[in-house]
Image (cartoon, rainbow, N blue to C red):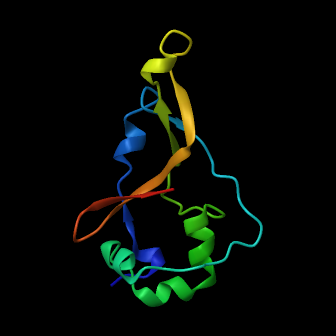
């Protein structure tokens, strides 16, 4: 299991460019705090479950702080109902901060 500072990232989605996403920084929230952490989700990220109790965990997973390797992107949405009026909208509701490479799979750390 890894500590938060030992995670490895692969930002393939960001490298697809502006046709697929828009660069965006998440807005920090005041005093982020952990409500619950799933041991199963922590295992998928190869994270030691005790990492959830560190103060920086809530800051990182809330978007209050970012990993140095993070490249936050808002997914571009261009639905059929909007085709006549717009080419693409950046959907900040679907923001990918970075893709975490684990021993199990490549998992997007998204909110």
Count of labels shown?
A: 0
Residue drawn at 41 percent across, 75 percent down:
6
Q: Where's residue 35, x and y in %?
A: 60, 79
Up-down relation of residue 38 to residue 91 (above or below): below
Residue drawn at 63 percent across, 82 percent down:
55
Up-down relation of residue 110 to residue 95 (above or below): below
Residue 28 vs residue 80: left or right? right
Q: Where's residue 4, x and y in %?
A: 47, 77
Find residue 44 and report its image quarter. Answer: bottom left
Q: Residue most toward the bottom? A: 50
Find residue 80 and report its image quarter. Answer: top left
Q: Residue most toward the top? A: 84
Residue drawn at 73 percent across, 62 percent down:
29
Up-down relation of residue 88 to residue 61 (above or below): above
Q: Residue most toward the left? A: 104
Q: Residue most toward the front? A: 81
Q: Where's residue 9, x and y in %?
A: 38, 60
Up-down relation of residue 77 to residue 71 (above or below): above
Camera-side residue of 22 and 35: 35
Camera-side residue of 39 and 21: 39
Camera-side residue of 7 and 49: 49
Q: Where's residue 110, x and y in %?
A: 46, 56
Residue drawn at 38 percent across, 43 percent down:
13
Q: Quadrant of the N terminus?
A: bottom left
Camera-side residue of 39 and 108: 39
């Amino acid at each position: 299991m890894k500590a938060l500072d030992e995670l490895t990232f692969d930002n393939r989605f960001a490298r697809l460019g502006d046709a697929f996403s828009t660069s965006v920084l998440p807005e920090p929230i005041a005093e982020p705090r952990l409500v619950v952490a799933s041991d199963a989700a922590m295992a998928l990220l190869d994270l030691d479950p005790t990492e959830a109790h560190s103060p920086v965990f809530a800051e990182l997973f809330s978007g209050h702080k970012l990993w140095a390797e993070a490249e936050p992107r808002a997914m571009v949405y261009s639905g059929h109902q909007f085709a006549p009026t717009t080419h693409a909208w950046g959907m900040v509701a679907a923001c990918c901060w970075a893709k975490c490479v684990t021993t199990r799979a490549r998992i997007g750390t998204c909110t």
